[in-house]
Image: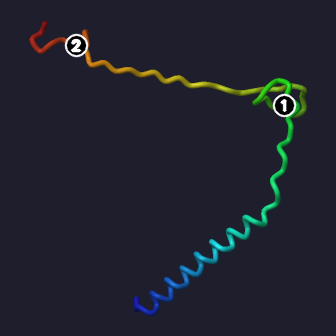
Amino acid sequence: MPMGKRNRILFLAGMAIGWLAATGAEAKDRLPPAKAPQTSGCEFMGPGFVKIEGTDTCMKISGSMRLDFGASTAPRADVFSASGH
């Protein structure tokens, strides 16, 4: 690729990146304001409850995870020694 053509491509790529960065910032400023969060009608039940559409039922789905681990520097009692004892 001749050096002149390479420089032209790099220049155009730089211009495109600059244009995208500039228009992205402007687009962010033109976004409509965020809507206020809608209430679910289940606030009296506590946080995390949502109303199932078409019913008077409120439901909350949750869960938990537990992870235990340990380590020891003592030799294991169930491993036979090299002498066979």
Residue placed under numbered mark 2 in the picture: 79
Marks 1 and 2, how far apart in space?
Answer: 57 Å
Of 7 and 31, the residue lying toward us: 31
Sequence order check: which comes first, mark 1 or mark 2? 1
Q: How is the image coloured?
A: rainbow
Label 1 Cα neighbours within 10 Å, binned few <14 / some 14-19 / many ≥20: some
Label 2 Cα neighbours within 10 Å, binned few <14 / some 14-19 / many ≥20: few
Residue at position x 55%, y 84% from top? 12
- Secondary element at image label 1: strand
Which of the 4 image quadrants contains residue 80? top left
Of 63 and 33, the residue lying toward us: 33
Question: In the rendered view of the protein, which quadrant contains the C terminus?
Answer: top left
Residue placed under numbered mark 1 in the picture: 51
Residue at position x 81%, y 53% from top? 34
Residue at position x 82%, y 24% from top? 45
Q: In the displayed structure, would residue 29 be above or below residue 63?
A: below
- Taking the image as shown, residue 16 lies to the left or right of residue 68, namely right
Residue at position x 58%, y 81% from top? 15
Callout 2 amino acid: Val
Q: In the displayed structure, would residue 23 be above or below residue 74?
A: below
- Taking the image as shown, residue 85 lies to the left or right of residue 9, namely left
- Taking the image as shown, residue 77 lies to the left or right of residue 19, namely left
Q: Where does residue 79 sit, x and y in percent of width and height? A: 22, 13
Q: Where does residue 20 sit, x and y in percent of width and height? A: 63, 73
- Secondary element at image label 2: loop
**Label number found at residue 82:** none
Total numbered badges shown on the rendered structure: 2
Question: In the rendered view of the protein, which quadrant contains the N terminus?
Answer: bottom left
Q: Where does residue 78 sit, x and y in percent of width and height? A: 25, 10
Callout 1 amino acid: Lys
